Image: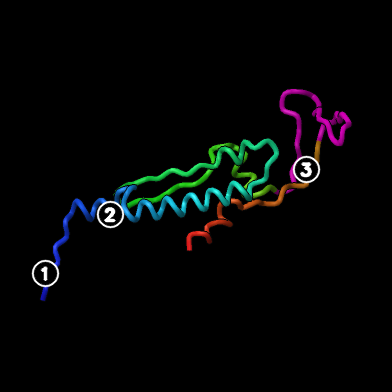
């Protein structure tokens, strides 16, 4: 029977280095998912789309990529909200423009928002 010899530095580079086969595979899939997430995310100002990023990590368990956004409203955009009340924080009344008309009120009944799962919807692209 033939003896199999593993050269540790070569195997380590292949499996654990971002420039190895596994690292390049993760990079390709991560770019594909983050590109699709940017295309799916809602755009009002473009800040959420621009904030979606991918980072490549390596630890004792192996390599992985993390895709997401660090903007505070990214989670709410992804998960949606239930109907809720909006009350003024610092002023006595809320002031905003709706359909070109200035509105001044003490309370707004927000109907909630539907989730836009721009990250988890695109995990199927890993296949």
Residue in the picture at 33% in, 55% down: 21
x and y, in percent, of residue 23 in the image: 36, 51
Using a 10 Å C-alpha cutoff, classify the residue at mark 1 as few (fewer than 14 neighbours), some (14 to 19) or many (20 or more): few
**Above or below — where is 96 with respect to 1?**
above
Q: Nearer the viewer, residue 61 or 67?
A: 67
For disc 2, the marked residue is: 14
x and y, in percent, of residue 51 in the image: 56, 38
Q: In the image, is 21 to the left or to the right of 51?
A: left
For disc 3, the marked residue is: 110
| Marks 1 and 3, how far apart at CA | 70 Å
**Residues rendered magenta in the picture:** 82-107
Q: Nearer the viewer, residue 109 or 77?
A: 77
In reply to whether residue 114 is colored magenta, the answer given is: no
**Above or below — where is 4 with respect to 116?**
below
Residue in the picture at 81% in, 37% down: 108
In reply to whether residue 91 is colored magenta, the answer given is: yes
Q: Nearer the viewer, mark 2 or mark 3?
A: 2
Residue in the picture at 53% in, 38% down: 70
Using a 10 Å C-alpha cutoff, classify the residue at mark 2 as few (fewer than 14 neighbours), some (14 to 19) or many (20 or more): some
Residue farthest toward the right in the current orientation of the protein: 101
On residue 3, the disc is 1
On residue 53, the disc is none
Q: In the image, is 58 to the left or to the right of 90?
A: left
| Marks 1 and 2, how far apart at CA | 21 Å
Q: Nearer the viewer, residue 61 or 23?
A: 23
Secondary structure of the residue carrying tag 3 is: strand
Q: How many marks?
A: 3
Residue in the picture at 76% in, 23% down: 91
| Marks 2 and 3, how far apart at CA | 52 Å
x and y, in percent, of residue 96 in the image: 81, 30
């Amino acid at each position: 029977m033939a003896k199999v010899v593993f050269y540790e530095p070569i195997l380590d580079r292949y499996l654990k280095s971002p420039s190895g086969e596994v690292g390049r595979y993760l990079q390709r899939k991560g770019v594909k998912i983050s590109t699709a997430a940017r295309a799916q995310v809602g755009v009002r100002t473009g800040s959420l789309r621009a904030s979606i990023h991918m980072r490549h990590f390596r630890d004792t368990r192996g390599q992985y990529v993390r895709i997401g956004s660090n903007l505070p409203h990214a989670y709410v955009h992804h998960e949606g909200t239930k109907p809720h009340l909006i009350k003024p924080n610092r002023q006595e009344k809320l002031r905003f423009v709706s359909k070109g008309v200035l509105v001044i009120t003490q309370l707004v009944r927000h109907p909630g928002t539907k989730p836009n799962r721009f990250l988890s919807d695109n995990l199927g692209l890993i296949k």
